[in-house]
Image: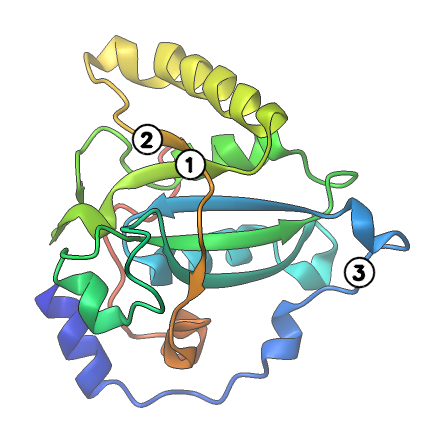
Amino acid sequence: MLGRIKSLLNVAPTAVDPAKFRAPMSSDASKSEVATFAAGCFWGVEHIFLKHYPPSQNKGILKTSVGFTGGNPLVTHPSYKNVCTGATDHAEALKIEFDPTIVSYAELVEFFYRTHDPTTTNRQGNDNGSQYRSAIFFHSPEQEATARRVTAEVQAKHFTPKGKKIVTEINPASQWWDAEDYHQLYLFKNPSGYQCSTHRLHW
């Protein structure tokens, strides 16, 4: 947490054109889907997804946004400052709009697991608190079934042999709130900004 606060105070942002991180919609825009993941600091989650699925390379991700979800429904329009207290119970999360004819939801779920530690409760690296929990927020029964199947496969292949257990929550998607604009594409605007040590490819 302290590293993130220092990052906000001390890093001079680089000008970034958000259009570079948006892909043209497919011919049938109604067929795009949304995936929502929480895996610790949302700066790093967005950064690693966009590094490996850059919209400009037509790998399936159309656009992303970071924000807050899964919290107390009585708390509306939560701010970053409010969420960081843990009092609202929102998770920092990434919302991905993707083209399922190019990248499957199952592939995105597996990538989500590859890029953080899903065995720590309410923590990623040095970041502690419920806002940093690992969670999948599904948008349909099909997404729920896929998320549970892929979770079981990843558990058996990558964590059971190590004696570890995935603690990722799998919950229905609830109200989404975009984070403040300066959080969007943060690590592209601030390349030397704070990044959680767990946000890397683990296999």
Q: Are marks 2 and 1 in contact (CB under 8 Å)?
A: yes
Q: Are marks 3 and 1 in contact (CB under 8 Å)?
A: no
Q: CA distance from mark 2 to mark 3?
A: 30 Å
Relative height, residue 119 to residue 10 (above, below) = above
Residue farthest toward the left in the current orientation of the protein: 2
Relative image position of residue 152 (x, y in whole percent):
42, 13
Q: Which mark is residue 169?
A: 2
User: Which residue is identified by label 3?
Assistant: 25
Mark 1 belongs to which amino acid? Ile
The answer to which of 39 and 54 lies nearer the viewer is: 39
Left or right, 117 with reference to 26: left
Element type at marker 1? Answer: strand
- Quarter of the image for the N terminus: give it: bottom left
Q: Earlier in the sequence, mark 3 or mark 1?
A: 3
Left or right, 24 with reference to 147: right
Q: Would residue 124 be seen by someone viewing this image from the given angle?
A: no
Relative height, residue 119 to residue 186 (above, below) = above
Closer to viewer: mark 2 or mark 3: 2
Q: Which mark is residue 136?
A: 1
Element type at marker 2? Answer: strand
Which residue corresponds to the image point at 23% horizontal and 52% vertical from the top-left? 131
Mark 2 belongs to which amino acid? Glu
Q: Earlier in the sequence, mark 2 or mark 1?
A: 1
Q: How is the image coloured?
A: rainbow
Which residue corresponds to the image point at 23% horizontal and 18% vertical from the top-left? 165
